[in-house]
Amino acid sequence: IPLTVSSLLRAFRYRIGLTWLLTLCETVLIAIVPLFIGFAIDGLLPENTGALFQSVIIMAALIVVSFARRAYDTRVFGTIRVEVGKAQAARARDQPVSILNARLGMGREIVDFMENDLPLVMAALIQLIVSIIVLFSFGPMLAIAGIIAVVAMLLTYAPFHQNFYRLNGHLNYHMERQVGILVTR
C-alpha cells in the first residue's frame, strides 16, 4: 500500500474524521463570534444583557472545543506518525539508516500536511462560506463582489499549481539523492 494522503485517510478514517469534525465546530464558532459580538453591542445599547451572555456562551464553547481538538489532534497524529514510521522502516529494512531517516522525514511531511494544512483549508472554506452569507445579508452586491474576488484569486493560483506540486517532488527527489551521495561518501 502506498503511503499517500488518501491511504492514510482510509486507514485512520474515524480518528481523522473526529478531528475534522472538531475542526469544523471550532471554525464555525470562530466564524460566528463577530456576529454575536455585534448582537451583544446592539443589546447593550438598550441595556439588554441577554445577547452578551450568548456571546459569553459562544466564547466558552470555542475555548472548550479548541482545547479538545488540539489535545485529540496531538494523540491522533502522533499515532499516525508512529504507524507511518513503522511502515517505512519495514519497507526499507535493507536500506542504510541515512536513507531511512530521509524517507521518515518525507513521511512526516504527509502527516504534517494532514494535521496542519488540511484543517486550515477546511477553516478557510467555512469562513469563506459564512462571509459570503453575511455579506449577502447586508446586500447581494457585496456577496457577488466577494465571490468575484475569490474567483480572481483561484484563477491567479491555478496556472501555478502544477509547478508547486512538481517543485515539491523535485525537492524530495534531491533529498533522497543527497542522502545517497552522503552514504557513498
Image: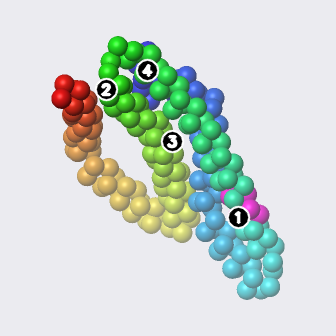
Distance from label 2 to label 3 (Cα)?
25 Å
What kind of element bears circle 2?
helix
Amino acid type, residue under disc 4 in the picture: Ala
Front-lying residue, 153 or 91:
91
The magenta region covers 57-62
Residue 9 screen position, x and y as percent: 52, 28
Whether residue 12 is situated above or below residue 146 in the rendered picture: above
For disc 1, the neighbor class at 10 Å (few under 14, some 14 to 19, many from 20) is: some
What kind of element bears circle 1?
helix
**Quadrant assignment, res 166:** top left
Question: What secondary structure do most residues of the magenta stretch adopt?
Answer: helix
Q: How many numbered marks does the figure carry?
A: 4
Q: Residue 99: give its label.
A: 2
Q: Residue 155: give its label.
A: none
Distance from label 1 to label 4 (Cα)?
44 Å
- Which residue is label 1 attached to? 59
Q: Based on the picture, tell me whether residue 58 belongs to the magenta stretch.
A: yes
Precedes in sequence: disc 4 or disc 3: 4
